[in-house]
Image (spheres, grey):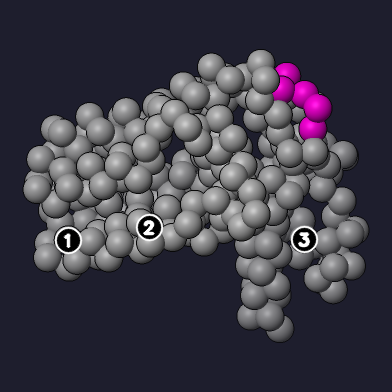
């Protein structure tokens, strides 16, 4: 029974996480716990446990006596997150280059090939990122730092990467014609495989900052799916 409960909790947490990252549950939207109970056929406690886990990931916010809400997005939050990601991602990358072995190199080559072979746009639209590309993209960035042996740093990195996924997906309508994402990834992989840590760090900093810069520049006209307000009008902590 305990194992079944844990499996239910993990399934709910993963399902809600994917909806938040894919912006099916939009920034600031309230999560109706009873609806999730009905959908998954589980107890109120199981859903609350799953949502509490997502709160720890920084994806939902719990309000006293008012339930849970998807964490909002804002320019300020995105910039704070980008700064934190640059620090952590670059630390992991530097350690990966120093500590990575042949298995790490092989994993990175395979991840780069998969990413390059996956279509970025969702079928039928140029403004929506495909789920397959998002998975390949996450796999590529994980492979870049997989040689790092500091599990604590890697755990922090994974949490920050997940939080940034919404911004990355929402950035697609504004970065399509202004950057060559494929070249950015190829240059990163090449520098890492050549063990040029200084170049790899500079490229990573530029790569992470580029998305943030594009969203800031386009904030006045950038729209969230299903929302009329531009990105800057949605607070990071909706009360």
Which of marks 1 and 3 precedes in the sequence?
Answer: 3
C-alpha span from label 3 to label 1: 40 Å
Q: Secondary structure at mark 1?
A: helix
Q: Position of residue 182 (x, y in %)?
A: 35, 45
C-alpha span from label 1 to label 2: 15 Å
Provide the residue designation for mark 2: 115
Residue range in magenta is 227-233
Q: How packed is label 1: few (under 14 Cα within 10 Å), some, or many (20 or more)?
A: many
Q: Quadrant of residue 88?
A: top left
Provide the residue designation for mark 1: 105
Q: Which residue appears at 77% of the width and 60% of the height?
A: 47
Q: Does residue 31 sit above or below 71 in this rendering?
A: below
Which of marks 2 and 3 precedes in the sequence?
Answer: 3
Q: Is residue 182 magenta?
A: no
Please tell me which residue lies in front, 114 or 160: 114
Q: Position of residue 235 (x, y in %)?
A: 71, 23
Q: Secondary structure at mark 3?
A: helix
Provide the residue designation for mark 3: 47
Q: Please state, as top left, top right, bottom left or bottom right, where the N terminus lies in the image.
A: bottom right
Position of residue 24 in the picture relative to residue 34 (left or right):
left
């Amino acid at each position: 029974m305990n194992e079944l409960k844990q499996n239910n909790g993990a399934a709910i947490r993963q399902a809600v996480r994917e909806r938040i990252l894919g912006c099916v549950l939009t920034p600031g939207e309230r999560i109706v716990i009873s609806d999730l109970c009905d959908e998954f056929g589980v107890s109120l406690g199981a859903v609350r446990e799953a949502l509490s886990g997502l709160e720890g990931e920084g994806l939902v916010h719990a309000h006293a006596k008012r339930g849970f809400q998807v964490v909002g997005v804002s320019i300020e939050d995105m910039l704070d997150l980008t700064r934190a990601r640059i620090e952590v991602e670059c630390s992991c990358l530097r350690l990966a280059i120093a500590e990575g072995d042949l298995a790490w190199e092989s994993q990175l080559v395979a991840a780069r090939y998969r990413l390059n072979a996956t279509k970025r746009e969702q079928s039928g639209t140029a403004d929506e990122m495909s789920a397959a590309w998002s998975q390949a993209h996450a796999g590529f960035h994980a492979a870049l730092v997989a040689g790092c042996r500091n599990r604590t740093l890697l755990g922090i990195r994974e949490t920050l990467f997940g939080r940034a996924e919404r911004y990355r997906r929402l950035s697609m309508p504004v970065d399509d014609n202004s950057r060559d994402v494929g070249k950015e990834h190829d240059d990163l992989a090449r520098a890492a495989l050549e063990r040029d840590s200084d170049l790899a760090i500079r490229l990573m900093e530029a790569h992470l900052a580029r998305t943030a810069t594009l969203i800031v520049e386009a904030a006045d006209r950038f729209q969230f799916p299903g929302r009329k307000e531009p990105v800057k009008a949605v607070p990071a902590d909706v009360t």
